[in-house]
Image: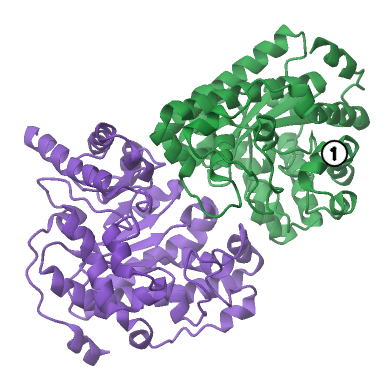
Chain colours: A purple, B green
Amino acid sequence: MATSNQERVQEFAPLENDLLLRAARGERTERVPVWVMRQAGRYLPEYKEAKGDKAFFATCRDVELVSRLTIQPIDRFALDGAIIFSDILIIPLALGLTALNDPGQGPVFADPIKKPEDVDRLNPNFDIIKELGYVYESITLTRQKLKGRVPLFGFTGAPWTLMKYMIENLGAGPNPNAARRFLIEYPAAGEKLLKILTDAIVRHLVEQVRAGAQIVQVFDSSGGELGPGLFTKYELPRLQDIAYKVKQEVKKQGLELIPMVVFAKDAHYATEQLATIGFDVVQIDWTQNPTHARRLAGTKVTLQGNLDPVMVFGTDDEIRHNVKEMIQKFGTQRYIANLGHGVMKETNPDKLKVFIDAVHTYSEEINALS
Amino acid sequence: MATSNQERVQEFAPLENDLLLRAARGERTERVPVWVMRQAGRYLPEYKEAKGDKAFFATCRDVELVSRLTIQPIDRFALDGAIIFSDILIIPLALGLTALNDPGQGPVFADPIKKPEDVDRLNPNFDIIKELGYVYESITLTRQKLKGRVPLFGFTGAPWTLMKYMIENLGAGPNPNAARRFLIEYPAAGEKLLKILTDAIVRHLVEQVRAGAQIVQVFDSSGGELGPGLFTKYELPRLQDIAYKVKQEVKKQGLELIPMVVFAKDAHYATEQLATIGFDVVQIDWTQNPTHARRLAGTKVTLQGNLDPVMVFGTDDEIRHNVKEMIQKFGTQRYIANLGHGVMKETNPDKLKVFIDAVHTYSEEINALS
C-alpha cells in the first residue's frame, strides 16, 4: 500500500478558496461557503453529454470521465467545494456482491443478503486498490485538474445504509423494513455485517484521503428509519468508530488531518448525539428547523444544510427569500450552506445558480453588518 | 342525506369495552387500551382465506366480506378496538381518478395528476353515498355484528397524503418529491387540490360517524416529508379544519361526539402543533422518543403508539421488555398502545399476541402499584 500511495501522491497546487475547510474547522469565515449534494449529476446538460450512454457503474470506473464530471459544476457555479463523482454502492460490490443493474434500472444486486449465511459469502479482506483503485486515481487526477480552485470531497455510505441496500436491493420491488427486521431476527449476523462494512468504510475513507481528498462525508441516507433505540445501539457506535479510526489512521500515516461530515438523514432524534462523536460537521435535512438543530447540536460543530431541494423550483425571489431566512436561522459562522438532500434531476441549473449566489450575497451582507 | 341516514342508522348494542374511548377522551383507565394499525390484513391466515383471489378494491366494496375481515383480529386477539377494513385511496377514486391496478400491483391510477389543469378534471361534488356508500354500509353492518364488544374506528387519508398519491402514483416507478414540487411550482392548483380533498375528507368522516363509527383516525402517512415550513403552511390548517368541521357537523346532526386521532408520520417537527388543533389523540411513529413526544404534546391530548413494527419479530421476552419500556415512558394514562406504523405482512400473529397481551399485563401491574 505504501508503494501505491507514493505512486499516487502528487504535488498539488495550493488551495485558493479554503472557505469550506475553515467553516468545517470552526474558523471564522467572511461569507458562508456553499456546495450541493449530487452537484455533479443528471440535472446538468453537460453531464448528460459527457456521460452519453455509458452505464452508471462504468462511468464511476472511468477515471478521466469522473474527473470531468466532478469539475463541471465548479466551472458553471461559484461553488466552494467539489465532490468526487462516485456511488455509495461500490463498497458492497467490493465486498463481493454482483451488480445486476445500475441504480435506478431495476434490482441492483444479483445476490442480495437474505439470510445470515449470506454475510459469510462476503470477502471482508478484499484488495482495496484492486477493487476501488479507480476512485483514488479519480481523486488524485481531479485534484490535479482543480489546481486548488476549491477543496475536494471524498465520501462513503454509512454502515446501516449500505446494509439496508444490500438486503432490500433497491429496485427489486417493495421490501420495506426488511433490513431493520434482519437486525431484530438475526442480531449476530447483523452485527457482523455492520462490522464488515465499518472496516471497509474506514479503509475506503483513508485511501481517499491518501489520494488527495481534503474533506470527507459519510452518508447515512436511511439512518432515520432506525429510530432512537436501534440507531443508538447499532449505528451510532459505528459512526463514532469511523470518525475515530479514520482520523487516527490519517495521523499515523502522516497525512494532513481532514474535517469529516456526517449526514444521518431523517435521524432528527440523534442530532445532539451526532454532534459529539468526532465529526466536525453535521449535515441537517430539510425536515429540521435550523434553530432547533443548532440548539441540539451546540456550538462545537459546524452545521451543513438544509434547504428543501424542491425550493429551487420556486421563483428567483422565493429562492432568495428562503436562502436569507435559512442563513438568518443557521447564522453565518460554523455553517456550510447546502440543500437538505441531493439536488433533483429535474432541477433547472439556472435556478440552482440563484440559490448558490444568494448564499454568497446574503451572508456577505449579514457579515458586513456585524 | 337525512333519508339515507335514517335507513342506515340502527339500534346498536351498548358498548361493553369502552377503554379506548375513555383513554381518547382523557378519562382514567384501569389498563392501557391497545389496537394495531392494519390489524385486519395479510399477516392473518384467516384474512387470506376469506379474501381469496378477490382484488383489493373489490374487497373494499364487498360489505359482508369487509365486516368479516374487520372482526377477524377481534376474534383472535384481546384488542380494545376494531378498524373498518378500507383504504385511503377510495377518496381519489370517488373524485374521479380511475383505478388501473390495486395498490402494490403497479401504478394505481390510470390518470394521475400531472399538471394544474388535471385538478379541474376532478369532480368535487361527487355523490358520496353513490361513490362510497359501501364504506358506510360496512360500518353499520360491522358495528351490528360487533355487538358492542369494542368500539369501531372509521378513517381517512389526510389531504397532503392523498395529494401525494394522486400525483406520484404509487407503483408507477420512482417519482420522488413530485407532489412537493407541484406545491412549489403550481401553488394555486396545489391549494385547490388540497381544498377539494379537505372537503371530501370531512364529508367522508361525517358519513362514517353517521353510519356508526365511534372514533376516527386521519392518516397523514407522508406528512413528514413536507418539513416544518410547508407542513405549517399547507397541511396543518387543513387538519385543523377537518377536526373542527367534522365535530361541528356531527354536533349539528345530533350525532354522538366522537374522539378524533391524527397521525402525521415522520412529522416529528409538528408534534407540539398537532396537539393543539382539535384532535383528541396524536399518534406517534417509532422514530420519536415517547418521553420527548409527551413533553412536546403536553398533557391535554392522548398519545397513541409507537413500537417499531419490526420489534414483534424479536423473541417473546424482547417483545415484553420493549412493551414494558414503552408503557413506562408513555405512562398508563392518556395513552393508547399501538405500533409506530402498520403491522407488517410478514408478522407472525402469535408474536403480535405477545405484544397485545403484554400491554394489558404490564399496564395493569403498573396501575395496581400506583
- Which residue is located at x 53 percent, y 27 percent? B194
Disc 1 crowd rating (10 Å Cα; few below 14, some 14-19, many 20+) is many
Placement of B304 over or under B26, stated as above or below: below
Quarter of the image where one finds residue B285: top right
**Which type of secondary structure does the marked residue at label 1 adopt?**
helix
Q: Camera-side residue: B345 or B89?
A: B89
Residue B136 visible at all: yes
Residue furthest to the bottom in view is: A3
Q: Where is residue A338 in the image (x, y as percent from the top left)?
A: 28, 49
- Left or right: where B80 falls relative to A6: right
Q: Quadrant of residue A243?
A: bottom left
- The x and y percentages for residue B295 are 50, 32
The residue located at (81%, 56%) in the rendering is B350
> Disc 1 sits on a residue from what chain?
B
Reading the image, the residue beneath label 1 is B66
Q: Does B242 sit above or below residue A237? A: above
Quarter placement of the N terminus of chain A: bottom left
Q: Which amino acid does label 1 sit on?
A: Val
Along the line of sight, which residue is nearer the eye, A127 or A53?
A53
Query: Is residue B29 at least partly visible in the picture?
Result: no
Q: Quadrant of the C terminus of chain A?
A: top left
Q: In this view, does B141 lie to the left or right of B255?
A: right
- Establish if B243 lies above or below B31: above
Tally of marks: 1
State which quadrant residue A19 falls in. bottom left
Q: Relative to the observer, which residue lies in front, B296 or B128?
A: B128
At a point 21% along the width and 56% down the height, the residue shown is A24
Residue B1 picture location, percent across and down = 79, 13
| Image spot of residue A302 (x, y percent) | 25, 51
Q: In this view, does A173 lie above or below B86?
A: below
Q: Which of B291 and B301 is in front in this view?
A: B301
